[in-house]
Structures are given as structure tokens and as C-alpha cells.
Image (cartoon, rainbow, N blue to C red):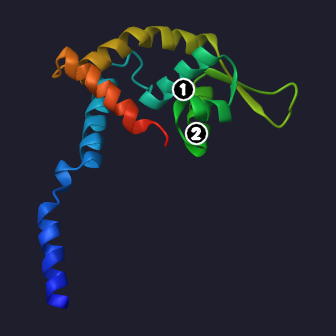
Amino acid sequence: MADDRDGQEQGMAGLYQVTEQVGHLLRKAYQRHLSIFQSNASDPDLTSVQFVTLCALHDLGPSSQVELVKATSVDQATIRGIVERLKARGLVDLSRDEVDGRKVIISLLPKGETVLQQMYPQGHIISEQTMKRLNPAERVALLFLLRKIAEDD
């Protein structure tokens, strides 16, 4: 019996090619996108997640960390580090909420707005470069499918 199970496991393992799996391909595509981002960013010290955070602050206005987690899909521990790095660069400011003194509010500073305004055109270039191998229908399909995969159950 053990021989039958070993044979089945080896047979199944032979069919499984990690390089053809969705997780591997998504990670590889994301690594390519990050490389394109870094090559085209107007600010070489800005990461893609920092850019998303600045965009969220621009769109939402002053926000708590919980609100940024929801808006960016970045976990609490990571967003805390991102905010600290943006603060150290003078791009955002932290203050206490007037109603709930325990809550920290993050606000976009003028220097952060300037970085963001310089990055918007680059963001379009980055997206274009990331999808340059796709025709218009494939681009629409890719974005549709990524949204569908990413949505919560």
C-alpha cells in the first residue's frame, strides 16, 4: 500500500510545475512591475507601497492608520513602518485625533503633495510599461481578473 501511495504522490508531483502556478506567476509579474516602478519613479527613494499610501492620503485627507490599512490593503504593522519612513522624509505629519486622543492621524504635507504630483505622470508610464506586451482587450481582461481574484469572499 505504501508503494501505491508513493507512486501516486510522485505522479501528482510530476504534474505540478511550480513555475506554472498562479502564485508564482503573480509574484514574478509583481517583481517585474516593482522593477519598472523603481526605474521610472520620479523620486528614487519612494517605494510603490509608499506611493500608494501617499495616494490614499491625498484621496481621503487626514486619516488614521486603520483607514490607511483599509484604503491600501497593507497590513497594520507594515503601514506603521511606511508612515514612519514618510514622516522621517517630511512627507507626512502625525497628530492626535481631537476627539479620541489615542488615535493617530496622518496628514499629507506640502512636500508629500509635491512628490505625489511629480509621481502621477510616472504612475501612468509605470502602468503602461508593466502592460506593454498586452493588447487593449488583454489589459481590460487582466485588470478585471485581478480585481476578481483580489476581492474578499
Tell me if residue 65 can be seen.
no
Q: Nearer the viewer, residue 3 or 56?
A: 3
Q: Name the residue that disc number 2 marks.
A: 81
All told, the count of numbered labels is 2
- Give the residue drawn at x 12%, y 80%: 7
- Residue 119, given in percent of the width and then of the height, sits at 43, 13
In the image, residue 39 lies at what x, y percent? 29, 23
The circle on residue 92 is: none
Does residue 62 show up?
A: yes
Foreground label between 2 and 1: 1
Q: Which image quadrant is residue 86 in?
A: top right
Name the one closer to the observer, 9 or 91.
9
Does 23 appear above or below 139? below
Q: Earlier in the sequence, mark 2 or mark 1?
A: 1
In this rendering, the answer to whether 131 lies above or below 79 is above
Image quarter for residue 133? Answer: top left
Q: Indicate left or right for 29 with 150 as reference.
A: left
| Residue 22, position as x, y percentages in the image | 26, 46
Q: Which residue is mark 1?
A: 53
Describe residue 41's horizontal placement relative to residue 32 as left or right. right
Q: Quadrant of the N terminus?
A: bottom left
Circle 2 residues within 10 Å: few <14, some 14–19, many ≥20: few
Q: CA distance from mark 2 to mark 1?
A: 11 Å
Please report contact status of discs 2 and 1: CB closer than 8 Å, yes or no.
no
Label 1: element kind = helix
Q: Residues within 10 Å of mark 1 (few under 14, many from 20)?
A: many
Q: Quadrant of residue 139?
A: top left
